[in-house]
Amino acid sequence: MLLSGHADGDVIRYSEIAPVLRARGLSTVRTTEVLDRIGVLLDDRPATFDLWLERKLDGLAAGIRRDVEGWARTLHDGGPRSRARHHATVWNYLNRIRPALSDWSSCYDHLREVTRDDVIAHLDTVHGSPRQHTIVALRSLFRWAKKNGTIFKNPTARVRVGQREEGVIQPLEPEHTSGSVAAVTHPADRLILALAAVHAARPGAIRRLQLNDLDIGNRRLTIDGRTRPLDDLTLQLAYEWLEFRRSRWPDTANLHLLINKQTALGTDPIGKSSVAGPALHGQTATLERLRMDRQLEEALVHGPDPLHLAEVFGLSEKTAIRYANSARALLERPLEADPATSPRTHGFTP
């Protein structure tokens, strides 16, 4: 339909495609892939990053805005002696310091007017992890400005944040896990929940799982290169998912264990939003909390040994020590109930 009046040398703009297809309830994804492959697509959409940056810079003083935009674009695109950073890093940095920039814009025209006292005054309004993240982002901004000669002195130099105290990780309550289990009904979501709750798999690792990582015959599961026993619960949920997968997409060439209606037509993994647990929206026991709870349970059952936790889950030294310290604090509490002697199944009924 789009190529019906096409002649050699013509291009088809994305802005022309979208209204035509959407009016007929059709997806633009595959169509644009084909047009791009044959070299006739002109993607004239404004960059998402540019639109986002424009919104974030709105309301800032002209001089401050100019420096912040240059810094953000250098982070995003890279530059001489500066590697490009992931877009999420740029978003997090700018979102974190946006309140400070807004306050300073009400009384200053340029970043060079910001003093060390101004930086400390803003840091006093945030605490804990947000405080650390804020000073990291401010240091990045002012170092860039100093390097590029737009300020004379870096006001974040020698500003100390202090050591952040790590709190004790608390186990989930039974009603929280039961609520999450009741919320998931799709075979893929149930398997994802088990991978997080029983095997402490991270979302990225779940997305990367291949069919041959699931060794049903030998009851083994390999997650990011670490092979572990396949328990009865995960095995049963894997059977249910594989049967659904086979009946729904019998001819797919995608070798990832988890697929959906979009990725079944290609070979890519499912997107982050698909594994982030949309069915768990509003639940206390999210995938991340279930993963943390499983690692804490391992430390409670087998003892607060960081080496054991690092070996079982592939944790870093610092993270393993944190879980071990939390388990030790919980075990030393008076009248502490004895932990379960096997990994919890969080209310699943195979």
Image (spheres, rainbow, N blue to C red):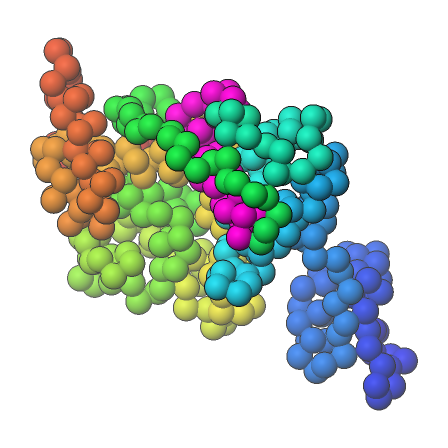
Q: Is residue 103 left or right of residue 18?
A: left
Task: Please report the residue visible at 43 percent of the width from the left and 23 percent of the height from the top.
Answer: 127
Where 172 sits versus 85, above or below? Answer: above
* Magenta span of residues: 121-147
Question: Is residue 4 shown above or below 45?
Answer: below
The residue at 56%/43% (across/down) is 152
Residue 144 picture location, percent across and down: 54, 50
Q: Residue furthest right?
A: 5
- Asked whether 187 or 11 is in front, the reply is 11
For the stretch drawn in magenta, the main secondary structure is helix
Question: Is 174 above or below relative to 238?
Answer: above
Can residue 350 be seen from the camera position used here?
A: no
Inspect this view and state whether residue 107 appears: yes
Of the 4 image quadrants, the one containing the N terminus is bottom right
Residue 29 sits inside the magenta stretch:
no
* Residue plotted at (17% across, 62% down): 218
Judge from the rendering whether residue 267 lies leftward or rightward of residue 241; answer left or right: right
x, y (%) of residue 106?
Answer: 71, 26
Q: Which residue appears farthest toward the front when viewing the image?
A: 152
Side (left or right) of 209 relative to 146: left
Q: To which quarter of the image does residue 91 belong? A: top right
Residue 96's spot in the image, x, y percent?
54, 35
Foreground: 248 or 188?
188
Name the image quarter holding residue 198.
top left
